[in-house]
Amino acid sequence: MLIESIEPVSKDRSRVKLEGGHEFVLYKGELRILKLKEGADLSDEVYRNIMETVLPKRAKLRALNLLKARAYTEYGLKKKLAEGGYPDSVSDIAIAYVKSYGYINDRQFALDYLSDQSAKRSKKELYQKLSSKGISKEILDGAFAEVYGSYKDAREESSFDETDVIVKTLKKRGFTGNESYEERQKLLAYFYRRGFEMDSVYKAMDSLKE
């Protein structure tokens, strides 16, 4: 395969672009050791070494370092690796590696997130947030059923009394019921953005009026 270009992406890394649209990122030292040059031909043997040994080894270490800092979903970790210039096939190898040790677990991520955020957000927003992190509907439905007990559809609010959550939030914000129209509208907008039903917000506000 022809090496069409080698372009710097940082002080010590460069993006190697091959004919056919294939590309990957290597360190300067790796480029030197592998003797890669723009306009030269890349042999199948060297290409396999890069894709099956050089990049996977580095991607595994990168994934482990990312997970030391915070938890990731499988989708989130793959996105982060892609930002680092790792091809999908290499990211898949790294993810399979950390997954085999239990370092990423979308179900546990969802359960931990719900435990931490259930008193701050509506169930509707929680579902949307976790969906945006790439967690499958099957895993989400199971996690919501485990956390909330009875469950029909986590995207509905029928089995979730959110008034208590709203009341707690209003108390933290010092709500008394004597706020100005502008202040009240800001509070309503705050709860609306987080997926709370406006009837529940009005009900909570009325219960706290002095």
Image (cartoon, rainbow, N blue to C red):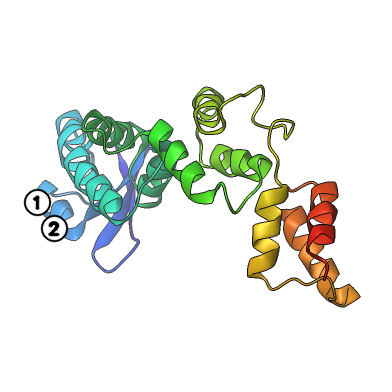
| Closer to the camera in the image, 193 or 16 | 193
Q: Which mark is residue 125?
A: none
Q: Quadrant of residue 77?
A: top left
Q: The residue tagged with tag 2: helix, strand or loop?
A: helix
**Label 2 crowd (10 A; few <14 / some 14-19 / many >=20):** few
Give the x, y percent position of residue 18.
34, 41
Please name the residue that numbered disc 2 is placed on: 29
**Label 1 crowd (10 A; few <14 / some 14-19 / many >=20):** few
Please name the residue that numbered disc 1 is placed on: 33
| Closer to the camera in the image, 47 or 93 | 93
Q: Is disc 1 in contact with disc 2, using a CB cutoff of under 8 Å? A: yes
Q: The residue tagged with tag 1: helix, strand or loop?
A: helix
| In this view, 152 is above or below 72 | above
Q: Is residue 116 left or right of residue 66?
A: right
Q: What is the spatial separation of the Cα atoms under label 1 and label 2, in whole angstroms?
A: 6 Å
* Residue furthest to the right: 181
Tag 2: amino acid? Gly
* Residue furthest to the front: 210
Give the x, y percent position of residue 88.
37, 35
Q: In this orientation, does residue 20 appear?
A: no
Q: Is residue 16 left or right of residue 57?
A: right
Give the x, y percent position of residue 73.
41, 40
Give the x, y percent position of residue 67.
29, 49
Q: In the rendered view of the protein, which quadrant contains the N terminus?
A: top left
Q: How many marks?
A: 2
| In this view, 192 is above or below 12 | above
Q: Is residue 190 left or right of residue 30?
A: right
Tag 1: amino acid? Ile
Which residue shows up at 51% across the image and 36% down it? 134
Which residue shows up at 87% across the image and 78% down it? 180
| In this view, 22 is above or below 80 | above
Q: Is residue 186 left or right of residue 112?
A: right
